[in-house]
Image: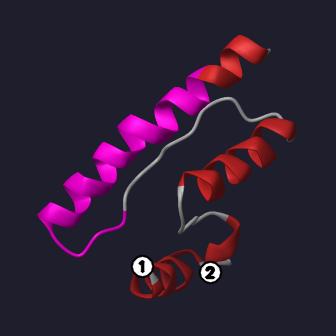
Amino acid sequence: VTRTANAYKERTGRDPRQTIVAGDNDDIMRRIDEYVAAGASKFILRPIGTDDEDMLAQTQRLIDETLPAVAGLNKAA
């Protein structure tokens, strides 16, 4: 995460804490809720990993945990 955050900051000049979320599904959903409250309606969720196995595991967690929670936001609206 640190390596990715540093590369992002170097590439964009922006604070990675404003865009990169590292944590569990609750952390991700809190950030999504912040963006929704600000009017955002589309998101790109991308795993950060060191190898294929890590990327696949994180992608599976996004599918299993985060996507159903995001789908629930549409039903609540």
Image-quadrant location for residue 74? top right
Along the horizontal axis of the image, is 41 left or right of 12? right
Dot 1 surroundings within 10 Å: few (below 14), some, or many (20 or more)?
some
Q: Amino acid at mark 1?
A: Thr
Residue range corresponding to the magenta coloring: 48-71
The residue labelled by disc 1 is 4
Dot 2 surroundings within 10 Å: few (below 14), some, or many (20 or more)?
few
Q: Give the overall secondary structure of the magenta segment.
A: helix
- Secondary structure state at the residue bearing disc 2: loop
- Where is residue 39 drawn, in percent x and y? 82, 34
Please tell me the numbered disc located at residue 67: none
From this view, report whether residue 4 is shown above or below residue 46.
below
Quadrant location of the C terminus in the rendered image: top right
**Residue 2 part of the magenta segment:** no
Q: Amino acid at mark 2?
A: Gly
Residue at the (22%, 65%) spot, across then down? 54
- Secondary structure state at the residue bearing disc 1: helix
Q: Nearer the viewer, residue 24 or 48?
A: 24
From this view, report whether residue 35 is shown above or below residue 71.
below
Which mark is first along the chain, 1 or 2?
Answer: 1
The residue labelled by disc 2 is 13
Residue at the (42%, 79%) spot, across then down? 4
